[in-house]
Amino acid sequence: MKPVEPVGIAAAALWLPEGRARMAEAVADGRLRARQAKELGHPEVPEAGPESAPGMAVDAARAALRVADIEAKDLDICAHAWMYYQGHDLWSPAHYIAHELGAHRALPVGIQQVCNGGAAGVELTVARLTADANRSPDGYRWGTVTTGDRFTEPGFDRWTSDYGVVYGDAGTALLLRAPAAPEDALRLRSVVTMAAPELESMHRGADPFAPAARTQRPRVDMRATKRAYLHEHGHERFIRANENAIRTIVAEALRDAGIGPRDPRLRYAVLPRFGLKTLQEFWLPILADCVDAEPLDYGRTTGHLGAGDAAAGLAELMDSRALGPGEAALVFSAGAGFTWSCLVVQAPGR
């Protein structure tokens, strides 16, 4: 998707709790084998204490609003995405976030697209901001995209509920505006998403449909559903779909942004926050063949942040001032379904 008018990323925030879950302790407890720990490559990940998942999203959104010096009352949309339980059984965390921020004029929207929800929230928010000709008194339309996830016992084991991924707790927020302004830290040049719905059963497996959450098993077990899928279909179907999706979203996102794959302005490719082996086998070789951009792996000390990988990558890209004037980066997100997204962002010129 190429925005019909320029869209700016006015601010991005990553909020991490103070607690840390350490891989060495998981190995010592017998939850991980030493070989598995090496393949994952996360010495520690953030672990929430009393913080709720939506509460961390609120903290991140407040930080983004402060950076841009924008009041929540000016927001037009508050999109919130998540992967895991938000703290109440039948409830809208998006409305809670808007209420806590004081964004009483905004439309709260909840997005349940699992790990790719943050990127889906960007697409939805951009479409909303650029489709409406009405503007606030400052001449802009404003939107936040937040994520918040807390992967806690007893229902989730951050170390062993999945293959190739360790899950960290965090809140993220992006503050978008249309049209873009010269002072925006980055401009969103394009965002492209591709899905492979035929892979949905990787997270369903052979399980029957259940009447309530975790009645099938007392803990989320994506390993079990993936084993069932692989037993029936093998590995090649997913490997082919993953490679095709990464190549497609890179090519289409760069085309929409008007940037070539070997353009010297294209400096970085911000990776999803997966385990080392997963990145080395299923991401890095494909990206090296597609673009000259240097891969950035910000996830070693955070792990996978549920729906928040793309926003967290943008926040760290901006905080580190990694992009010089006019330089661009690819930012990736992927999740169950399966769905893959690529955002192209560019720093303002001189």
Image (cartoon, rainbow, N blue to C red):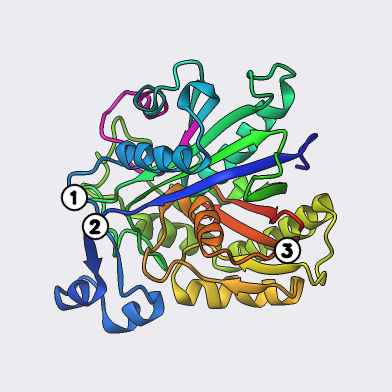
Closest to the observer: 128 or 157?
128
Mark 3 in CB contact with mark 2 (< 8 angstroms): no
Q: Residue furthest left?
A: 29
Q: CA distance from mark 3 to mark 2?
A: 33 Å
Q: Secondary structure at mark 1?
A: loop
Q: Which residue is mark 3?
A: 327
Q: Quadrant of residue 55?
A: top left
Residue 198 percent coordinates (x, y): 61, 48
Instruction: Please determine whether, in this image, residue 220 is positioned above or below residue 319.
Output: above
Using the numbered discs, state the Cα–Cα distance from disc 2 to disc 1 in whole angstroms.
Answer: 8 Å
Residue 111 appears in the figure: no
Report the residue marked by disc 2: 18
Residue 245 percent location from the top left of the image: 68, 58
- The magenta stretch spans residue 144: no
The residue that mark 1 highlights is 49
* The magenta segment: 79-96
Q: Is residue 9 above or below residue 323?
A: above
In depth, the one of 179 and 246 nearer the eye is 179
Verify CB contact (< 8 Å) between mark 2 and mark 1: yes
How crowded is the residue under tag 3: few (<14 C-alpha within 10 Å), some, or many (20+)? some
Locate residue 241 relative to residue 108 in the image: left or right: right
Within 10 Å of the Cα at label 2, are there few (<14), some (14-19), or many (20+) other Cα atoms? Answer: few
Residue 90 lies, with reference to residue 300, above or below; the image says above
Disc 2, SS? loop
Quarter where residue 62 is shown? top left
